[in-house]
């Protein structure tokens, strides 16, 4: 040591106590935190096992094979009260997925319309879109669901006085009754034609974009895609002997008969989710469009392009790179918000699972199934949207 504080050159630093060593102290704190976490998990599991034992409830998922014994108002697959709890949960899961898919598609379309309308040079259209966003997104979603269900749909007339729409659709307080499609054996040919049409449409789209990038020549992509997607199934419909027919509803003296009915709970839930989510998507679209340089629009105008083609060919493709990440969050929110359906009795996964929980007492298993399903749906949605975001990302050389 050359003085009282610094070690001599080439000498060794003085040893310090282990509790004054930041590295060792960090290991100790992490070990203590891990021990506390393990103790908490052990206590929670032990407490749950003790409670289940006291209530004579067997742990595990064996209860899913027991008979459910309750009805479900809307099912996408055959369902009867004599079927099992497991199938009942699948019915609820499919109802949740139906609401999520329909809601995402409609909310995306309405959100883009609202976002573009917010930037419209027409003062009336712009203000209508502005007030729509400000009012809808500041009202609680559950309130909107109850409004559509109790204040709008529940006040409609009964089936006896149902409103007729084009003579084939009837709207009443029991929902929307519409023609029911009846599929013959040859209808599978139409499905195959539809799948082939969709695949061919995207192949043509990819070829047309590549051709335009190489030669500058444009191809009527949209018209061709719609022609393939709609034209091939129509041709297959007539070639297979028109195997699809419809059972039309009829209004009798006291009730409606025939057709198929969409229950009011589903209609109220979809309308509220779409309206609420579209308000947020509209703002995302507006921000994405405004993020595109104004010089891009001016360049399009200098080339003589119309405002519609400037929007479709220049602005929207560049704005999508800004829109996609927050749009993914809105899709996830819509899916998770569908659990509010329990407030109006729509038989989604949470509602059906709650009925199973009340009858069996298997709270831990049901909650684990809810968590697993929502996490799976969210992860799949995120993976797909991230893939699409990387696909449209600007590639720098």
Image: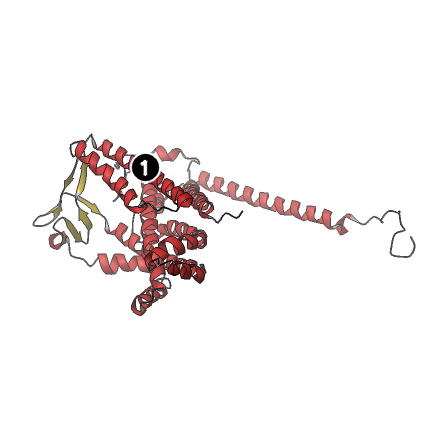
Closer to us: 149 or 292: 292
Q: Is residue 41 visible?
A: yes
Closer to us: 358 or 256: 256
How are the colours assigned in the image? secondary structure
At horizontal 37% and vertical 62% (from top left) the residue drawn is 137
Instruction: Determine the residue located farthest toward the left in the rendered image.
Output: 253
Image quarter of residue 131: bottom left
Q: Is residue 355 visible?
A: no
Q: Is residue 4 above or below residue 18?
A: below
The 10 Å Cα crowd at callout 1, few under 14, some 14 to 19, many 20 or more, is: some
Closer to us: 93 or 364: 93
Q: Residue 395, image x and y in percent?
A: 50, 47
Q: Residue 96, image x and y in percent?
A: 34, 45
Closer to us: 78 or 204: 204
Q: Which element carries disc 1, helix, strand or loop?
A: helix
Reading the image, the residue beneath label 1 is: 200
Instruction: Determine the residue located farthest toward the right in the rendered image.
Output: 2
At horizontal 71% and vertical 49% (from top left) the residue drawn is 25
Q: Is residue 228 above or below residue 154?
A: above
Q: How many marks?
A: 1
Q: Residue 346, image x and y in percent?
A: 29, 49
Instruction: Determine the residue located farthest toward the bottom in the rendered image.
Output: 123
Q: Residue 363, image x and y in percent?
A: 41, 43
């Amino acid at each position: 040591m050359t003085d009282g504080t610094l070690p001599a050159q080439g000498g060794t630093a003085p040893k310090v106590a282990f509790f004054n060593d930041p590295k060792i102290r960090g290991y100790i704190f992490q070990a203590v935190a891990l021990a506390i976490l393990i103790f908490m998990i052990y206590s929670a599991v032990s407490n749950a096992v003790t409670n289940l034992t006291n209530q004579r409830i067997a742990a595990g998922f064996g209860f899913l094979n027991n008979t459910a014994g309750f009805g479900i108002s809307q099912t996408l697959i055959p369902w009867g009260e004599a079927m099992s709890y497991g199938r009942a949960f699948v019915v609820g899961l499919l109802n949740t997925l139906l609401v999520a898919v329909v809601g995402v598609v409609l909310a995306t379309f309405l959100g883009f319309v609202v976002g573009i309308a917010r930037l419209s040079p027409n003062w009336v259209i712009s203000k209508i879109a502005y007030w729509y966003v400000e009012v809808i997104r500041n009202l609680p979603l559950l309130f909107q669901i109850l409004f559509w269900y109790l204040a709008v749909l529940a006040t409609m007339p009964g089936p006896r006085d149902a409103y007729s729409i084009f003579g084939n659709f009837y709207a009443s307080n029991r929902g929307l009754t519409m023609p029911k499609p009846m599929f013959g054996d040859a209808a599978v040919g139409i499905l195959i034609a539809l799948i082939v049409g969709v695949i061919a449409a995207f192949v043509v789209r990819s070829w047309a974009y590549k051709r335009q990038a190489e030669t500058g020549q444009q191809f009527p992509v949209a018209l061709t895609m719609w022609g393939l997607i709609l034209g091939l199934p129509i041709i297959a419909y007539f070639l297979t002997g028109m195997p699809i027919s419809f059972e039309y509803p009829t209004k009798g003296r006291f009730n409606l008969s025939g057709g198929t009915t969409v229950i009011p709970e589903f209609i109220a839930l979809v309308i509220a989710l779409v309206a609420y989510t579209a308000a947020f998507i509209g703002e995302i679209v507006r921000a994405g469009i405004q993020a595109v340089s104004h010089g891009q629009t001016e360049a399009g105008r200098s080339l003589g392009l119309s405002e519609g083609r400037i929007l479709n060919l220049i602005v929207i493709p560049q704005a999508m790179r800004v829109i996609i990440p927050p749009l993914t969050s809105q899709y996830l929110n819509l899916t998770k918000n569908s659990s509010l359906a329990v407030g109006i009795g729509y038989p989604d996964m949470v509602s059906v699972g709650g009925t199973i929980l009340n009858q069996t007492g298997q709270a831990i298993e049901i909650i684990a199934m809810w968590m697993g399903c929502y996490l799976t749906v969210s992860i799949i949605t995120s993976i797909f949207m991230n893939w699409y975001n990387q696909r449209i990302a600007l590639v720098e050389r």
